[in-house]
């Protein structure tokens, strides 16, 4: 079977109807090419809104959500329920045979408790019920589904061997999944035109040294740090091509997914980024 394409969508692209229509149309065209496609999604802003309604404080560090038990209940409800179901329904109306999953399905998103997180300024923070993808994740379900022409759409919820659920950062989930599937490309789509420099201009290409500078000089925002570390993991584990793109632009999104060169509103990462902490 051909190496798959893994595309990760930020939740902000899925809660807005016009953005959702753009995303689904682009993915329909990509899926129609016949190449295996696996989609991962988050849902951060809808989780934030649900936490506010529930009276639960939002806490984050370096783009990672600190997750206690009540927060985890909200995360699972929003991601596996509203966001995933809405996204799958929208995709199936335009062509792709989408199948909604979480990492709990058939062990495809096996996770382990995340270690204490050391922030860019040196603090050590317990993330709670946050997981990190495990090497024991079973990729068989993805291979079966894509081999039969289905498009797996995965909410970033992990599960341990003993059945505990974990909140897994969507970028981290996608980076590890791309590595485990030996994807030929990982595309991370959000609402910014790739990685931006201190002037707000898109950086067309990044190498290991440039990634290190963006993180340690704090040019990268908290959310972008998580993305860059996910990209680092994918590249260090055999994914040849990683593109961060503005998913609001359907043409750019499609070109990032299947084009030979990234569009203008995108950043391509290449080379071994194993020196960047993933």
Image: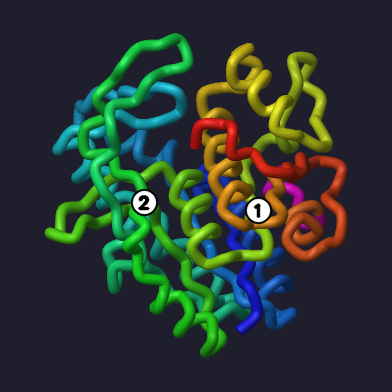
Residue occupying image coordinates x 73% and y 73%? 29
Q: Is residue 247 left or right of residue 98?
A: right
Q: Quadrant of residue 24?
A: bottom right
Residue 27 in sight in this render? yes
Instruction: Say which residue label 1 marks.
Output: 187
Q: Nearer the viewer, residue 213 or 92?
A: 213
Q: Position of residue 99 (x, y in %)?
A: 44, 75
Which quadrant holds the N terminus?
bottom right
Instruction: Say which residue label 2 marks.
Output: 133
How packed mark 2 is, by other alpha carbons closer than 10 Å (few <14, some 14-19, many 20 or more), is: many
Residue occupying image coordinates x 52% and y 67%? 181
Residue occupying image coordinates x 61% and y 57%? 238
The answer to whether 59 is drawn above or below residue 175 in the figure is above
Q: Is residue 249 part of the magenta span, yes or no?
A: yes
Q: Position of residue 244 (x, y in %)?
A: 69, 44
Q: Quadrant of residue 21?
A: bottom right
Instruction: Provide the residue span drawn in magenta.
Output: 246-251
Q: Nearer the viewer, residue 90 or 114?
A: 114
Q: Is residue 162 left or right of residue 63?
A: left
**Residue 10 numbered tag:** none
């Amino acid at each position: 079977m051909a190496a798959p394409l893994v595309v990760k969508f930020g939740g902000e692209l899925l809660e807005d109807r016009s953005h959702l229509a753009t995303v689904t149309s682009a993915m329909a065209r990509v899926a129609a090419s016949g190449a295996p496609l696996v989609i991962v999604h988050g849902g951060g802003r809808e989780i934030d809104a649900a936490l506010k309604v529930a009276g639960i404080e939002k806490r984050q560090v370096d783009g990672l959500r600190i997750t206690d038990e009540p927060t985890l209940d909200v995360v699972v409800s929003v991601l596996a329920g509203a966001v995933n179901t809405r996204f799958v329904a929208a995709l199936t109306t335009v062509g792709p045979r989408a199948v909604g999953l979480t990492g709990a399905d058939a062990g495809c998103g096996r996770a382990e408790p995340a270690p204490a997180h050391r922030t860019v300024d040196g603090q050590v923070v317990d993330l709670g019920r946050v997981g990190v993808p495990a090497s024991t994740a079973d990729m068989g379900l993805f291979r079966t589904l894509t081999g039969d022409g289905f498009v797996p759409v995965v909410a970033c919820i992990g599960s341990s061997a003993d059945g505990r659920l974990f909140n897994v950062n969507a970028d981290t989930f996608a980076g590890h999944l791309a590595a485990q599937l030996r994807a030929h490309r990982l595309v991370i789509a959000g609402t910014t035109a790739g990685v931006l420099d201190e002037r707000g201009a898109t950086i067309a290409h990044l190498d290991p040294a440039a990634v290190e500078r963006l993180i340690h000089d704090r040019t990268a925002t908290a959310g972008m740090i998580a993305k860059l570390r996910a990209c680092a993991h994918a590249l260090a584990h055999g994914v040849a091509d990683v593109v961060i793109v503005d998913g609001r632009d359907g043409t750019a999104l499609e070109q990032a997914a299947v084009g030979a060169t990234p569009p203008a509103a995108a950043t391509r990462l290449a080379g071994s980024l194993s020196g960047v902490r993933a």
